[in-house]
Amino acid sequence: MAPVASLAAPYAAMVVDARSGKVLHSRNADSRLHPASLTKMMTLYIAFEAIENGEISLDTKVKISKNAAAEPPSKLGLQSGQRIALRYLIRASAVKSANDAATAIGEAIEGSEAAFARRMTRTAKALGMSNTTFKNAHGLTETGHMSTARDMTTLGRHMLYDYPDYYNLFSRRSVDAGIKSVNNTNRRLLDAYKGADGIKTGYTRAAGFNLVASAERGNKRVIATVFGGRSTATRNARVAELLDMGFSRAGAQVALRKPAIPTYTRTKPPAGKTIRVTTAVKKSLRPKLRPGSVGAPTVAPVTVDNEGTIVAAAEVIEHDIQSALLAAQGESDLVLASATPAPQAPPEPKVVTRISTSGGRHWGINVGRYGSRYAAEKMLLKTALAEMSTLDGSLRKVTKNSRGFEANFMGMSKETADMACRRLQARQITCYTLGPS
């Protein structure tokens, strides 16, 4: 059912030149009001922060709690106990404004929605959002969950400049959210207003129809925020007027002054159950062999998962290539450990992987050469999110050679590889295809 027109919600607005942060228009901009689903901008901001700093990965399988599954619409339709990759929760939150997905993101990062809400508020203060307090990850009306047009405009500007590699998600008209394809709640403005490319809508009865929108024309970029719109149509019309006002008032030549990214502080230690043996064994507790014995039996490598379960090394060989790559940096739930005799120098831990080439998926693409494995893997993650439609299902692989670390997507058909490269090159991302070898 479509939301009914909101008549009582207070109105507030703010327009800024995104390049400099200069205020071009404001009305009731510091009134504390209900932000509704504009809240999810902060949920996603923290998700991007956590991914970039290694707290969690896009491929992490999140187990859906009863709390998340029970959230009211708008929702993706997640079921309690279901496991789904974080990337799909991010897409559903950003594009469909799914409440169950937003709650699941918060619980995955901080363990509980309450703890995540406290982190949201701390992050808001660090961004300069001095009049904002969050109580949940989705924005449904709750006592004390308040923000302002000024603060949400500030958050929109940080989202644009702090995590530009993820920002394109907000302009998608539809995306694959894992269990189904979902449409963008902001597609009407995106289709109707020239240069619009985000950011986020919001609606509750208490809040009215809210929107933070950004648009770029020529060398100008403007962000406009509206709280308390009476309907989707009137809100979009007002935002279009404010954007027009912003472009008319913004200077032609304005120096870009990006906002300062707040200092990252990890709020909880990493999980302590995953272990990695990287040093030589200096003392063996096993009894020495008797004279004349053939030799000690070979000890097979083992892994230990996050729940303390021992897994045979053969299972690691069959492990998904994406988890294997992440395991090289300690981000996977399977880490290969090997025992090394004392007299020898400890070898670097290695993860053995194989790529399936069935079904003609012998092709790949290269997105650059980097000086470290970390830099190459980081580029692969960013590129995967930037070009979801063609890279979904491909396998990320970093290959070391004498010139550095090659960042590759493998296991693709020739047609898919060609299309992905063309789309990436259109975004000014270096790319070339890799044929069967």
Image (cartoon, rainbow, N blue to C red):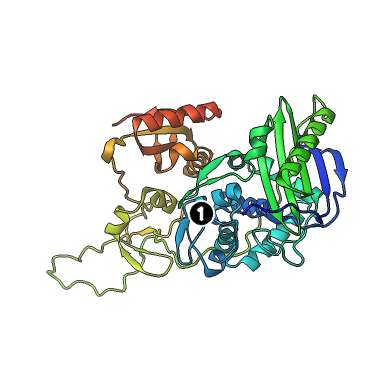
Please state if 262 lies on the left or on the right of 296 as rendered.
right
Badge count:
1
Residue type at mark 1 is Leu
Residue 149 to residue 195: above or below: below
Task: Residue at 76%, 59% (x, y): give it.
Answer: 206
Q: Quadrant of the N terminus?
A: bottom right
Please state if 92 lies on the left or on the right of 84 as rendered.
right
Q: Is residue 398 visible?
A: yes
Residue 69 to residue 24: above or below: below
How far across and how far down the image is residue 213, in percent? 71, 41
Identify which residue, 186 or 49, lies in the foreground: 186
Q: Quadrant of the C terminus?
A: top left
Mark 1 surroundings: few (<14), some (14-19) or many (≥20) residues within 10 A: many
How far across and how far down the image is residue 44, in percent? 62, 51
Identify which residue, 375 or 228, lies in the foreground: 228
Identify which residue, 4 or 114, lies in the foreground: 4
Please state if 133 lies on the left or on the right of 178 as rendered.
right
Q: Which residue is mark 1?
A: 86
Task: Residue at 39%, 59% (x, y): give it.
Answer: 334
Residue 176 to residue 340: above or below: above
Task: Residue at 59%, 57% (x, y): give it.
Answer: 102
Q: Is residue 20 visible?
A: no
Residue 405 to residue 229: above or below: above
Task: Residue at 27%, 58% (x, y): give it.
Answer: 314
Label 1, secondary structure: give it. helix
How far across and how far down the image is residue 47, in percent? 60, 53
How far across and how far down the image is residue 18, in percent? 76, 37
